[in-house]
């Protein structure tokens, strides 16, 4: 599917980037609340309106923008060209006064080591597969690159902070899902296509992108290192498939696919929100925000997915003028549209 003709009139890249920010903002105030408390505050469907001017986002959107600008500025999409740009953007984010949105400790710790000038394979937190690995990968899925480059870029941007193989695999699958949706694949086909991708990549280690990361993680071989990540992603996709076989009970999606604090659960739970509301992007991100888990990351990924499917027409028109970082989102979206 990658490389098919894209209908630019839908502005799918813009829809995906803005959708990520919308979901992030909608889930920001609910992240540490129970579903009962969320419904008490916002009603039975949870939040559906963005509040504020500007509407504030979290580190999810900030770091997605860091990845996006690194990709935008890269002279070519190779490890050697992109890694220094990612490093600089991540360090700028870490030092920014706007980095006050409860950033993840893994990202902060890794950025501290990157700032010392260490090779990223030494700076990364090798045992972390937190959702910080894939909450920011959406821009990779919006590039017109071949599947191997998409995979390498996805894993590289994850690996700078989150060195666990599941963080790498989940990031690749997240970007792959964005690309499939941008290419016009119906959302209902995603679980099967993502599972096929995971099975096909199980023995693949991308040493031209990852270097000696597998050794620093203490794995027995490159293939053994990679297989752990793909197997855990496949287990999460199995839970997603099982949930979809049951009627929607209207309850917290996290009960079926996990709370989303770790990468493979963030992917699966966001997809569950999407597939419960494939034709209603606002309902999907509202569902993601009405969870007892990592609500902003779940809703952000749901927004990125359905924004790629529906384009800007899937979102209320007035949101684009109020969301924080609107100028950056618009510039990058227009570039990739």
Image (spheres, rainbow, N blue to C red):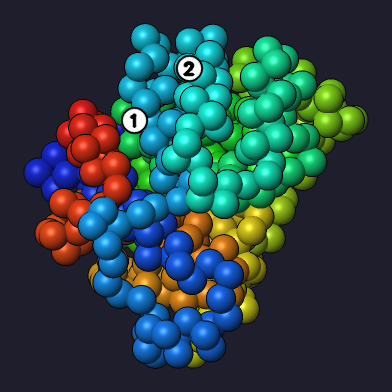
Label 1: few (<14), some or many (≥20) within 10 Å? Answer: many
Under circle 1, the secondary element is: loop
At 52% from the left edge and 85% from the top edge, which residue is drawn? 37
At 68% from the left edge and 12% from the top edge, which residue is drawn? 117
Query: What residue does disc 2 label?
Result: 85
Dividing the picture into quadrants, the one containing residue 80 is top right
Which of the two discs, 2 and 1, labels the residue nearer the N terminus?
2
Q: Is residue 252 above or below residue 29?
A: below
At 38% from the left edge and 31% from the top edge, which residue is drawn? 68
Under circle 2, the secondary element is: helix
Could one spot residue 146 in this view of the protein?
yes
307 horizontally vs 103: left or right: left
272 or 89: nearer the viewer: 89
Q: How many numbered circles are shown?
A: 2
Q: Residue furthest front?
A: 97
Could one spot residue 274 in this view of the protein?
no
């Amino acid at each position: 599917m990658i490389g098919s003709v894209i209908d630019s009139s839908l502005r799918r890249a813009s829809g995906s980037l803005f959708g990520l920010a919308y979901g992030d903002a909608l889930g920001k105030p609910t992240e540490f609340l129970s579903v009962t408390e969320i419904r008490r505050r916002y009603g039975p469907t949870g939040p559906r309106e963005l509040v504020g001017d500007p509407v504030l986002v979290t580190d999810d959107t900030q770091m997605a923008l860091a990845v996006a600008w690194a990709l935008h500025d890269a002279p070519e999409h190779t490890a050697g060209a992109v890694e220094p740009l990612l490093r600089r953007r991540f360090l700028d984010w870490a030092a920014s006064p706007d980095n006050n949105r409860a950033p993840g400790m893994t990202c902060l710790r890794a950025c501290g080591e990157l700032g010392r000038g260490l090779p990223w394979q030494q700076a990364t937190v090798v045992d972390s597969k937190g959702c910080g690995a894939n909450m920011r990968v959406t821009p990779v899925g919006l590039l017109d690159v071949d599947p191997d480059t998409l995979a390498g870029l996805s894993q590289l941007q994850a690996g700078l902070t989150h060195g666990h193989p599941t963080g790498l695999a989940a990031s690749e699958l997240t970007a792959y899902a964005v690309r499939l949706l941008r290419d016009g694949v119906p959302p209902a086909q995603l679980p099967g296509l993502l599972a096929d991708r995971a099975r096909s990549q199980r023995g693949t280690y991308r040493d031209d992108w990852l270097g000696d990361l597998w050794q620093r993680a203490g794995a027995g071989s490159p293939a053994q290192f990679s297989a752990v990540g793909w197997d855990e992603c496949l287990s999460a996709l199995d839970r997603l498939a099982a949930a979809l076989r049951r009627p929607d009970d209207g309850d917290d999606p996290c009960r079926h696919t996990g709370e989303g604090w770790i990468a493979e659960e963030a992917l699966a739970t966001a997809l569950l929100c999407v597939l419960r509301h494939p034709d209603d992007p606002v309902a999907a991100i509202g569902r993601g925000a009405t969870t007892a888990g990592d609500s902003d990351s779940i809703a952000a990924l749901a927004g990125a997915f359905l924004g790629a499917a529906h384009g800007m027409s899937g979102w209320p028109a007035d949101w684009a003028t109020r969301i924080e970082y609107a100028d950056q989102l618009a510039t990058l979206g227009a570039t990739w549209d």
